[in-house]
Image (tube, helix red, strand yellow):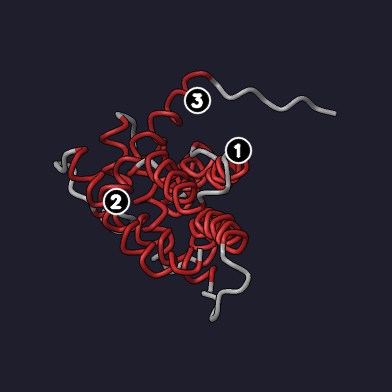
Amino acid sequence: MKEPKAVPVKESKAAAQILEAAIELFADYGYFGTTIRDVAKKADVTAMTIYRLYKSKDGLFEVTLNTVIKRSLDQAHFLLAVFNSKDKRDSQALITTAVRQWYDSLPQQPARLMMYAYLSQEEKWRELAYARLEEIVAVLAGTLDEAIDKKAKPRPKTAVAARTLVMALFQFKITQPKIKSAREERAAIEDILNQWLLGVAHSI
């Protein structure tokens, strides 16, 4: 069996520079607002180098999207670990603490890039971007199912409730102004959580 060819150091360095530039530009300006020339200029390489390594703008975007998803914390497992390691007697506090930690662990640039992918016309990109959020929704919905009083009537639709909260926080992460202070951001997140809890607290 032939050994795989080693990637030349110079080419590997160029690829790393291109990816970092692409993450920043695609996150800030989206797919259509970013050109290969923009990425080449920011990465200090030629456009031909990008085409040689990634074949096309679509190819570059897909590799960039996969890169930020792989780099990001495995958030569903992270949430599950938090839920499983806490005292479940205070379900509201457990859920809000875990969700806050998930929100804090989500970097803004990857979140923006994932949203651009989800809003694109490319089904493959949409599936890649949304799969991670659906993992979070599933874990949160399962925790709500366990926390809700079995005698509660009517029982809330936990998947809908979980998706509503996750998408609200995800959207806020993407759209919040960069100048917002940490205190203002925390206050806004508290408001989102409190409003959400008003809808489900009577069942927990």
Give the mark toward the camera: 1 or 3: 1
Can I make out residue 88 in this image? Answer: yes
* Residue 5, percent from left and from top: 67, 25
In this view of the protein, which residue sits in the foreground, 100 or 115? 100
Q: Amino acid at mark 2?
A: Ile
x, y percentage for residue 13?
45, 23
Instruction: Give percent across and percent down for residue 118.
Output: 43, 62
Of circles 3 and 2, the one toward us is 2
* Location of the N terminus (image quadrant): top right
Query: Looking at the image, which residue sits at the far bottom?
Result: 154
Residue placed farthest to the right in the image? Answer: 1
Quarter occupied by residue 48: top left
Q: Which mark is residue 28?
A: none
Among the two numbered marks 1 and 3 on one chain, the one whose residue lies closer to the N terminus: 3
Three-letter amino acid code at disc 3?
Ser
| Identity, as a three-letter code, of the amino acid under mark 1 | Ser
Q: Which residue is mark 1?
A: 85
Q: Residue furthest top?
A: 9
Mark closest to the chain's N terminus, 3 or 2: 3
Helix, strand or loop at label 3? It is helix
